[in-house]
Amino acid sequence: MTLSRQPTFAKNGKDGAPGNRHAKTCEEICLSDLEPKTMVWTYCGIRNVELDAAHAPLELGSGFCLAKPNDVLLSARHRYFMSEEAYKEAEAVSAYLIYKNEHPAIQDEGWDESLEVFQDGLMALQILKPVRTLGFVFQGSGKSGVASLSPGPTHHRPPTDGGQWASMRHFDGRLLGEVSDLIPKIRRVMQGTNAEHRNSIVLLQLGLEHSHPLIAGLLCIMGMEARFDSCDRHDFKKTLCACLGASTLAFPDWNSPNFPQPKYTVEELAIPMYMLRSKLAHGADLRKASVDKSTPVDLTKKVDLIPELEPRANAYLLSEAAVYLLCQVLQKCV
């Protein structure tokens, strides 16, 4: 069964494969050709994107682009459902990820479909390097060059946070250059019939949206297990090392030369990460993990990510590493 991005499960077709909610008969397609069309905009604010004003908007292909805040995008704001702080933040974010697609002028399920496609495109950025989002996803309609959009639905999702190491680097030109190739790959997975592969992407999204870092890490370890179907901690380590390489560093080299890359390897973190997942999933006392009879792991000891940062509990380091390892697994597998 495929996990939904909402707190429910997706509906499946008769044969157990995901049903096509958007399939239409030939008659419906012919009638839809006669309906008036409008351009639907679906977009969300993203923090810390290095978008050159001289080259904005930046076209990403597949109907996506990145643009700086402007009057058209900000016209969807409304103080009725946004706090004053969120209202001002919408103007201050560095960029908006925008998906445009033509739909019938009368709102129909096509608006929901645009929202799903948009979230797939957003996950392409998140897989390359987690980004912080505003949380509100706006929808409106209007042609290019309009002064404001006709308002559509606004969706409030938890803002994403990929952890301290990811937040120390902006989403810069090198990363932006990789987005266009990844979006269609994410779309193929999300339109496919393999529920586990889709779940691995959805679990990353849910992990990034969760406010508690330990639960975020748990969801991302689940995302790796959705790909690997490992039977125990040793199988998990073997499969993760086979996928990424045992000596691969868990924390990507995002912040050189300003900060050194953390030296924790996939092989070193795999079993402690799995043990953290087991303790969290069973509601165990993390302080007692160090005296586990089979595989003791000290989850509460203070460890350094890099010398320049404050030490943190081992459980928090493992949870943050899980986010980045799932990103690396998805980069390899999609």
Image: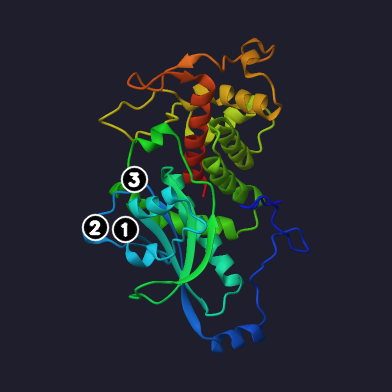
Q: For the view shown, which residue lies furthest in the left direction?
A: 54
Q: Name the residue under label 3.
A: 48
Picture residue at 62% right of the left edge, 23% below the top: 275
Gap in angstroms between the C-alphas marked 3 and 2: 14 Å
Picture residue at 64% right of the left edge, 83% below the top: 28
**How is the protein colored in the picture?**
rainbow
Q: Is mark 2 on a helix, strand or loop?
A: helix
Between discs 3 and 2, the one toward the N terminus: 3
Kindly identify which numbered label has been placed on residue 68: 1
The x and y percentages for residue 318 are 52, 26
Disc count in the image?
3
The x and y percentages for residue 13 are 74, 63
Q: Can residue 105 be seen in this view?
A: yes
Q: What residue type is labelled 2?
A: Ala
Left or right for 105, reference 84: right
Q: What element carries label 3?
A: loop
Q: Are marks 3 and 1 in contact (CB under 8 Å)?
A: no
Q: What residue type is labelled 1?
A: Lys
Picture residue at 55% right of the left edge, 89% below the top: 34
Q: Are marks 2 and 1 in contact (CB under 8 Å)?
A: yes
**Is residue 20 positioned above or below 319 on the image?**
below
Q: What element carries label 1?
A: loop
Left or right for 308, reference 202: left
The x and y percentages for residue 317 are 48, 25
